[in-house]
Image (spheres, coloured by chain):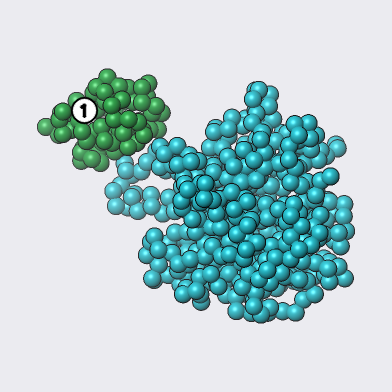
Chain colours: A cyan, B green
Amino acid sequence: MTLRRVVVTGLGIVSPLGVGHETVWSNILASKSGAQRVTDFEVDDLACQIACRIPLGDTADGKFNPDDWMDIKEQRKVDPFILFGMAAATQALRDSGYEPKTLEQQERAGVLIGSGIGGIGGIYEASLTLRDKGPRRISPFFIPGRLINLVSGYVSIEHGLKGPNHSVVTACSTGAHAIGDAARLIALDDADVMVAGGAESPVNRLSLAGFAACRALSTGFNDTPEKASRPYDKDRDGFVMGEGAGIVVLEEYEHAKARGAHIYGEVIGYGLSGDAHHITAPAEDGNGGFRSMSAAVKRAGITPAEIDYINAHGTSTPLGDEIELGAVTRLLGDAANNMVMSSTKSAVGHLLGAAGAIEAIFSLLAIRDNVAPPTINLDNPSIQTAINLAPHKPVQKEINIALSNSFGFGGTNASLIFSRVG
Amino acid sequence: MSDIEDRVRKIVVEHLNVEADKVTEKASFMDDLGADSLDQVELVMAFEEEFGVEIPDDAAESIQTFGDAVAFLTKATA
């Protein structure tokens, strides 16, 4: 069976550095940080008291106004990750200019949006209601408003997308897996258009306590939040949680060309692997990440030396960053000398299930603008490397092919490769 | 307009995101005010919470309009 070519024709982001891909991208290139002290709930007894938060305000100012994206009545029924996903999906569809009109077009357009932990905030609240007021006070919207696949459900209803309706849950690899799997559905002719990505709303007491207990979060920068996410830096001590959604419109190449769509890039490679090692820690030899990258490179039919930019998983945890760097170095060999690799999590935080999706978008914009976004806060690298980690400032460079890594709890790895088209 | 009517109308306006003047005695939650079956369940829960009463399922099914709700709650709290 011949695989069909898949391109990206629409982008949508809700993130701590703003709403809309142009706003977010210009903030990323300006080396801004979205981290701040959490003020909307009690954090004094938590080890980590900071997070990257979505700025609320007017849509026209690149900020988030929920009422512009979802009916007020519906907003009340869902956890924020669904709202963020709806906002990013609507942006991406508008950006693509595609709106299925006939029934046949609707049936060839699907949705594949995932989340790492979905409605954990709402589950926490409902459990308190159950304890304090009993089962008769549990809302009929409690379940549908918390289920991870309900982002795909809501988006399909809003936009009349009747093709494959699917979802992914692979922790911090979710967004990348969603885009990769959705691309395959198009490649295999199950759909012509897929709205794909990830959404997450993890900033609540329960998640902060839980991830801190896993020793995954930064705890030493509560007074200087903007300094906390510092991938590859010797003082890094964990990731900074972020909230939001990244969604792309994927489209079969001829379908996009026929309607004169703007094409951001082509999905040329997608690789997956499992560590089979530990529930939260990556294997020390980086073998899982190495194999997901190798599989993506093989699928793309390129050599590692042809990659111009790598958007790293790079979460700013003591263990993970160097292990990924080791795997990338092994993959590249001598080509490491010419590589630019950066972690945009330094700026926008770790959006868990949405991370791989927003980072896919950053990789596509790196190709569009021939610029590698910076790793902010990288003052003193903890390890010597030939790879340019783009400390503090973006790096201008011809970028035709970009690779994006995502690794998740459970030892689940995904790598995506995008290339310039035409 | 009774106090009960005001309180019920406030709940309906909030939950269904409709204009207060649309919430008339004969207005059906599902046919006129855009509620689906889950909205209807939630409305009844909100009435129970506000008025401190328990509305059994068979009684809940008979509450189809704003007038039904006001009548039921007037009786239940008398």
Residue at the image position 20 percent from the left and 38 percent from the top: B51
**x and y percentages locating residue A303 in the rendered image:** 88, 58
Number of numbered markers: 1
**x and y percentages locating residue B37 in the rendered image:** 40, 29
Label 1 marks which chain's residue? Answer: B
The quarter of the displayed image where residue A276 is located: bottom right
B18, A130: nearer the viewer: B18
Residue at the image position 24 percent from the left and 22 percent from the top: B25
Q: Which quadrant is the C terminus of chain A positioned in?
A: top right
**x and y percentages locating residue A114 in the rendered image:** 60, 47
Question: Of the residues shown, which amino acid type is indicated by label 1?
Answer: Val
**x and y percentages locating residue A250 in the rendered image:** 71, 41
A224, A222: nearer the viewer: A224
**Direction left: furthest residue:** B78
Disc 1: CA contacts within 10 A as few (<14), some (14-19) or many (>=20): many
The quarter of the displayed image where residue A371 is located: bottom right
Q: Which quadrant is the N terminus of chain A positioned in?
A: top right
Residue A175 vs residue A263: left or right? Answer: left
Residue at the image position 59 percent from the left and 30 percent from the top: A160
**Can residue B41 be seen in the rendering of this structure?**
no
**Direction front: furthest residue:** A60
**Secondary element at tag 1:** helix
Residue A177 vs residue A297: left or right? Answer: left
Residue B5 vs residue A7: left or right? Answer: left
**Can residue A297 be seen in the rendering of this structure?**
yes
Judge whether A348 appears above or below A101 on screen: below
Residue beneath label 1, please? B70
